[in-house]
Amino acid sequence: MEQVHRFEDKLLSITIPKEASFGEKLPLLYVLDGNAFGPLVTQTILLQTRNSPKTGVWPTMIVSIGYDTKDAFQRDARFNDYTPERIHSVLQEELDMPNGGGLATFQKQLLRIHEHIGRHYQIDNEKVGLLGHSLGGLCVLESYLEIVRLPFITDFLAISPSLWWDECAFFDRLATQSSISDKRLFIAVENDHGKMETLAERCYNILCQGISEKQISFYIGPEENHMSIVFTALSRILRWFFQKENANE
């Protein structure tokens, strides 16, 4: 069952598995860039829950957070929502990019969305994921560092995160962390032999110094690009999301 309704300036597409019984507490997965990735994630889960014991993917509630547009991506809005305020000057090659910087405001909105969902649906609070790609992946990792802003998220799922943003300022914030969150984290990236792979692996290696290997997983997709990695990594991420305890695959 799918419902679509407006929440402030966002469109929420909410999918409830038909297998759910009345009053059952469901795992919950928030999907960023909902216009583009909401249908993909929803169908990937629905098809695999036809035989969950074999696929390792179980019925879950999906909330895709999108924008009021027919386009797959709303460029200006996602730059604003998914990026923190800049601490460095804008580089020459980034002059045509939106300035961004509204992540803290979006995190407050996501908290209100979660409160709204909690008032209307039964949620398994021990299994709440946040999935994002590219700038959405950056949003996921920045939120992981600022867990106090989104304390209800248990699993942070980042695909090809845009860690290059603001001259890699994410790593400045990571270096100042006195303690690393005990929440779970999955990072997937394409094998591009370039900055996306290098920065994602750098992030993973730093985090591994402070958290248990059971809390984090890292996947490099061979022969993939910035978009195709979503398709190849998604099922792997979903299997990991539904595992209570796991080691790297």
Image: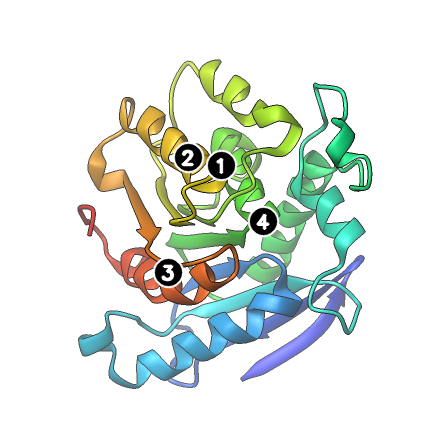
Disc 1 is placed on an element classified as helix
Evaluate if marks 4 and 1 touch, with contact meaning CB atoms under 8 Å apart: no
The mark that comes first in sequence, 1 or 3, is: 1
Give the Cα distance between marks 3 and 4. 15 Å
Specify whether 12 is left or right of 24: right
Query: Can residue 101 be seen by looking at this rendering?
Result: no
**What amino acid is found at the position of numbered circle 1 in the picture?**
Lys
Specify whether 171 is left or right of 57: right
Residue 216, horizontal then vertical, whole percent: 29, 40
**What amino acid is found at the position of numbered circle 3 in the picture?**
Ala
In the displayed structure, 81 sits above or below 203; it is below
Residue 68, horizontal then vertical, whole percent: 79, 67
Residue 36, horizontal then vertical, whole percent: 62, 68
Residue 51 or residue 72, whichever sits in front = 72
Specify whether 238 is left or right of 100: left
Evaluate if marks 1 and 2 touch, with contact meaning CB atoms under 8 Å apart: yes
Mark 2 closeness class: few <14, some 14–19, many ≥20 residues within 10 Å? some
Disc 2 is placed on an element classified as helix
Residue at 53% x, 53% y is: 133
- Residue beneath label 2, please? 198
**What amino acid is found at the position of numbered circle 4 in the picture?**
Gly
The mark that comes first in sequence, 4 or 2, is: 4
- Please name which of the two marks, 2 or 3, marks the residue nearer to the observer: 2
- Residue beneath label 1, please? 195
- Residue beneath label 3, please? 233
Give the Cα distance between marks 4 and 1. 17 Å
- Please name which of the two marks, 1 or 3, marks the residue nearer to the observer: 1
